[in-house]
């Protein structure tokens, strides 16, 4: 029942409205016995008894009951909708807030399509539980209970006869519930796969078109859609197997009422008016039983959806602030030390193996190495997107695990190789770290990133709206805007992860000059495959086989085989004679 407690927890602020709605439900459900009782009086006292002066008052009272019940029902629906929408907003905000503070492993493990399913379709089932299932459950219990008490009071013998059918309805309902529960869990997973397939195709539509794989993607989506359809049909078939049984038993109650009640009326056990009351209230016994099966149908969907929502709400990141974490408000110097650092994305394979090196504050450091050697991993570890498997990383002499995440993320800015731009203006993307930034500062950051020229040539200049993920901009333009955004943060450590890969050589040289002359103190780490991007760095780190080799351009060109080969391939001039024999391996700064 944790799912129900979870819903109750997020009703905070509208619990009174919810309880009011439930109390109104009790009232509207209880009054179902009033009009059948008034019908009894009409038959026994007015029609048979001759009390014709009672006719208009009774009819007026019956109309009043209908009006009151209708008005209360409308008020109840308004209350439940207000409560459910409030709960939905609270849960959705909690999910989004929790995701903002999740570590990257969370997004490695749960795909975006599944997250979208949890924050849309699954949440709708939670809202449906509050807005519909909850008050219908109360309505079923109160309607059935009120009718049962009234019927027992009139004729316990006839009531017990009718109740003999109820266990069969309950048995059919329980059997259906057990059979359909795993089906609805499967439906929820199939829906998630459908959303994942659609989202990946939308995000990767250019790749699909470039390789003419439209038919393949259509077939893949059709298969996901078919799987989702098949699971829904399984649930529908299971539902249709039990519905006729429940409907038959419910209708059988009416048959028993007429048969046994008619006999009791003939023998004088009950009056004709009491038979009329039984006939009117038979639906109050059968209808709740018929609705129970439908409610179990909705409940199974609710349980399956709530499990996924609760999971994502209580998924606690492993990378978080320690109780004794140090928060630093002032700027960092930017000194970084790796001491015997080992790291792997999986337990059985290390990307870095006992790596040690140091980066002086305010220096410029280049990082180069083969694909998969761990260049971007180093950037992620410095920013503490991941924690080391072994060893320690120090920022200004303090282990990053003992600093607050906020202070680290404010101090370290990364322009990644996979550029993401928001659907906002260019100025809005550049000033993302500080929306109140003066426009002159935005211009300055763009100039430092060599982006000012092409931005001003755009239709609306800095007010040009960037399409989703930067559609409409070239790769080099996106990279320069991303660099401007990183510079705008005025970081203590600026990491450029292959940020100039799509930029022409002339622009790259200008960007390098600007990066060496930033108007603030900053440690710059340049991850690149071009020797020209890092050859003038204060030191260069060569990664390979989980190890590092550290030195200047001339030193590495003379002793490191991988670095020398890259230099030769890129036709670097004025290289010293090669004297080394080892490949990219051990060494400390």
Image: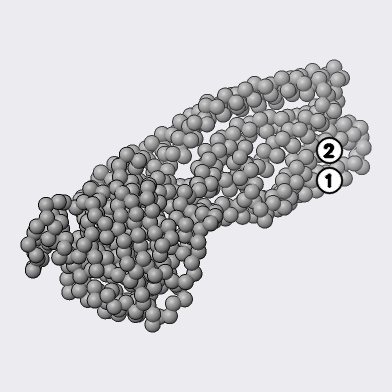
* Front residue (pair 568, 43): 568
User: Helix, strand or loop at disc 1?
Assistant: helix
**Would you say the residues marked 2 and 1 are in contact, meaning their CB atoms lie under 8 Å apart?**
yes
Residue most extreme to the bottom = 440
Residue at 75% x, 46% y is 23
* Front residue (pair 217, 324): 324
Q: Is 474 placed left or right of 42 in the picture? A: left
Q: Which residue is mark 2?
A: 38
Q: Position of residue 229 (x, y in %)?
A: 41, 37
Crowding at label 1, few (<14), some or many (≥20) Cα neighbours within 10 Å?
Answer: some
Residue at 67% x, 22% y is 167
- Image quadrant where one finds the N terminus: top right
- Residue 61's tag is 1
Q: Position of residue 500 (x, y in %)?
A: 24, 66
User: Helix, strand or loop at disc 2?
Assistant: helix
Q: Position of residue 270 (x, y in %)?
A: 85, 23
Q: CA distance from mark 2 to mark 1?
A: 8 Å
Residue at 70% x, 39% y is 138
Q: How many marks?
A: 2
Q: Which quarter of the figure has residue 560?
A: bottom left
Q: Can residue 63 be seen by looking at this rendering? A: no
Q: Which quarter of the figure has residue 379?
A: bottom left
In the rendered view, how is the structure colored? one colour
């Amino acid at each position: 029942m944790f799912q129900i407690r979870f819903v109750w927890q997020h009703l905070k602020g509208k619990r009174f409205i919810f309880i009011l709605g439930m109390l109104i439900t009790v009232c509207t459900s209880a009054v179902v016995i009033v009009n059948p009782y008034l019908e009894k009086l009409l038959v026994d006292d007015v029609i048979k008894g001759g009390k014709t002066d009672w006719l208009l008052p009774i009819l007026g009272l019956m109309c009043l009951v209908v009006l009151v019940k209708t008005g209360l029902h409308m008020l109840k629906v308004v209350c439940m909708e207000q409560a459910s929408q409030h709960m939905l907003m609270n849960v959705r905000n909690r999910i989004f807030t929790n995701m903002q503070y999740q570590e990257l492993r969370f997004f490695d493990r749960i795909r975006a399509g599944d997250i979208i399913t949890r924050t849309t379709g699954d949440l709708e089932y939670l809202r449906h539980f509050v807005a519909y299932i909850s008050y219908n459950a109360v309505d079923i219990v109160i309607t059935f209970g009120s009718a049962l008490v009234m019927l027992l009071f009139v004729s316990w013998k006839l009531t017990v006869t009718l109740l003999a059918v109820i266990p069969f309805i309950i048995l059919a309902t329980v059997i259906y519930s057990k059979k359909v529960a795993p089906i609805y869990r499967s439906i929820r997973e199939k829906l998630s796969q459908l959303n994942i397939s659609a989202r990946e195709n939308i995000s990767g539509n250019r790749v699909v078109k470039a390789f003419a794989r439209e038919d393949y993607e259509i077939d893949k989506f059709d298969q996901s859609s078919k799987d989702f359809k098949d699971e829904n049909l399984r649930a529908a078939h299971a539902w249709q197997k039990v519905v006729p049984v429940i409907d038959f038993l419910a209708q059988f109650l009416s048959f028993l009422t007429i048969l046994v009640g008619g006999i009791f009326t003939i023998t004088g056990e009950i009056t004709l008016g009491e038979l009329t009351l039984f006939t009117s209230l038979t639906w109050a016994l059968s209808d709740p039983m018929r609705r129970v099966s439908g409610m179990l149908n909705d409940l199974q969907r609710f349980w399956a959806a709530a499990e996924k929502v609760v999971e994502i709400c209580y998924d606690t990141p492993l990378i978080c602030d320690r109780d004794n974490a140090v928060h630093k408000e002032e700027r960092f110097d930017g000194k970084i030390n790796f001491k015997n650092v080992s790291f792997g994305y999986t337990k059985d394979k290390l990307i870095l193996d006992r790596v040690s090196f140091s980066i002086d504050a305010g220096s410029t450091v280049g990082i180069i190495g083969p694909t998969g050697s761990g260049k971007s991993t180093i950037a992620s570890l410095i920013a503490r997107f991941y924690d080391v498997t072994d060893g320690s990383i120090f920022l200004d002499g303090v282990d990053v695990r003992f600093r607050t995440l906020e202070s680290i993320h404010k101090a370290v800015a990364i322009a990644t190789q996979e550029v993401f731009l928001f659907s906002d203006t260019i100025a809005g993307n550049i000033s993302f770290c500080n929306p109140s930034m003066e426009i002159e500062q935005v211009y300055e950051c763009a100039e430092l990133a060599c982006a000012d020229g092409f931005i001003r040539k755009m239709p609306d200049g800095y007010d040009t709206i960037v399409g989703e993920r930067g559609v409409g901009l070239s790769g080099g333009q996106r990279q320069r805007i991303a660099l401007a955004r990183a510079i705008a943060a005025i970081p203590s450590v600026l990491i450029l992860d292959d940020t100039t890969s799509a930029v022409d050589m002339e622009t790259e040289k200008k960007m390098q000059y600007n990066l060496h002359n930033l108007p603030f103190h900053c440690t710059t780490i340049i991850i690149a495959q071009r020797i020209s991007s890092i050859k003038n760095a204060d030191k260069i780190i060569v990664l390979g086989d989980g190890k590092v080799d550290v030195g200047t351009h001339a030193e590495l060109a003379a002793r490191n085989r991988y670095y020398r080969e890259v230099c030769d391939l890129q036709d670097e001039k004025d290289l010293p004679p090669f004297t080394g024999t080892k490949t990219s391996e051990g060494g400390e700064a």
